[in-house]
Image (cartoon, helix red, strand yellow):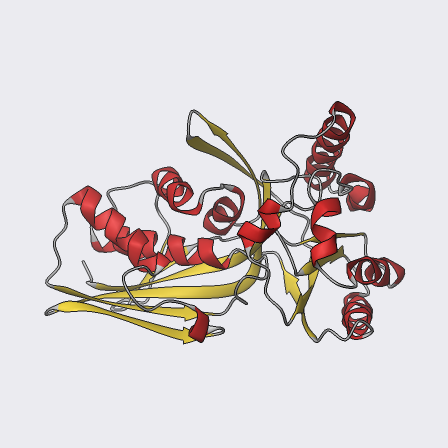
Amino acid sequence: MSNKVIARIPASTTNLGSGFDVLGLALQLYSSVELEETCSGVLIEIQGIGKESITDDENNLAYRAAKLVFEKTGKRLKGLKLTLTNGIPVERGLGGSGTAILGGLLAANYICGNPFSKNELLNFAFTLEGHPDNVSASLFGGLVVACVQNEKVHALKLTVPDELKVVLAIPEFQLQTQLAREALPKSVSLSDAIFNLSRGAFLVASIATGNLKHLGISMDDRLHQPYRKPLIPGIEDVFSAAMNAGALSVALSGAGPTVAAFCTEESIAISNNMQRAFAEHNIKSETKILNVDYEGAVVTSSCDKQVFDNLT
């Protein structure tokens, strides 16, 4: 068993409009966590995007996750070096915190001999993250529907049509998830709840049956986006710009501020239009055209470079 492993974890876009705190879609954009047993001490190194805003002490999410696994297994290491290579914009609604947590969990689990299943690791991640949608998608890949029953996460993976692409418009400013949560009402009307239930179910059915033309209707939302949009200047114009360029649907990615447009064609035009719309409000943005990640999280041994993916 190698004592040096690398976990690669995909980003996610969650909620997808109507699927608030339930739906997550894994994307081909990655962060990685490398763990190596050393002679003594703890060393945490941060590389990649936004490294200056990611803590490199024992409050680091990847370290806390790895430590949780070691504590549960009773594994004692002489020392530990953790390297987080972040490829996901920080606090932009792309599941970056969830990828760090999963990276720490999976790499530590591998070092310990894989005592925990993916479902068990998912529940550890939920304990650390606080909501199941992004960690479920990043762990399993594809589109994942998640729910919590008696503090236990249940998640099901759906196949997504290969032609679906996601265009991200990532503004230069950050939006803390806590602030976006605080913008939400404590209660909603029955009519709004029914509105979202019907759209969320229709969204899952649209993707499961490959009828992507229905995405525009099924991503309509009344539970969170109307309350979060005021936190993001120019957001309505960005939504309109994407739809006018040929997007099937548009939604906030997670809590925002990133905007995700879903399409099967015209991805470059959509990307350009979204970036231009943000610019008209004096906001710089980066755009990415991404495919869906179907594989989910993988762990690779530094010795044999073979992908490890036989957890059940």
Q: Position of residue 272 (x, y in %)?
A: 79, 73
Q: Which residue is at 64% across, 72% downward?
A: 172
Q: Which residue is at 80% across, 62% downward?
A: 238
Please identify the residue farthest to the right as the structure is shown.
244
User: In the rendered image, which quarter is residue 289 located in?
Assistant: bottom right
Q: Which residue is at 59% across, 46% downward?
A: 181
Q: Nearer the viewer, residue 128 or 295?
A: 128
Left or right, 15 with reference to 151: right
Q: Position of residue 5 (x, y in %)?
A: 28, 63
Examine the rendered structure and indicate whether residue 304 appears above or below residue 190.
below
The total number of labels drawn is: 0
The answer, for residue 307, to whether it is visible in the render is no
Q: Which residue is at 49% across, 41% downward?
A: 132
The answer, for residue 121, to whether it is visible in the render is yes
Q: Position of residue 255 (x, y in %)?
A: 62, 52
Q: Nearer the viewer, residue 215 or 228?
A: 228
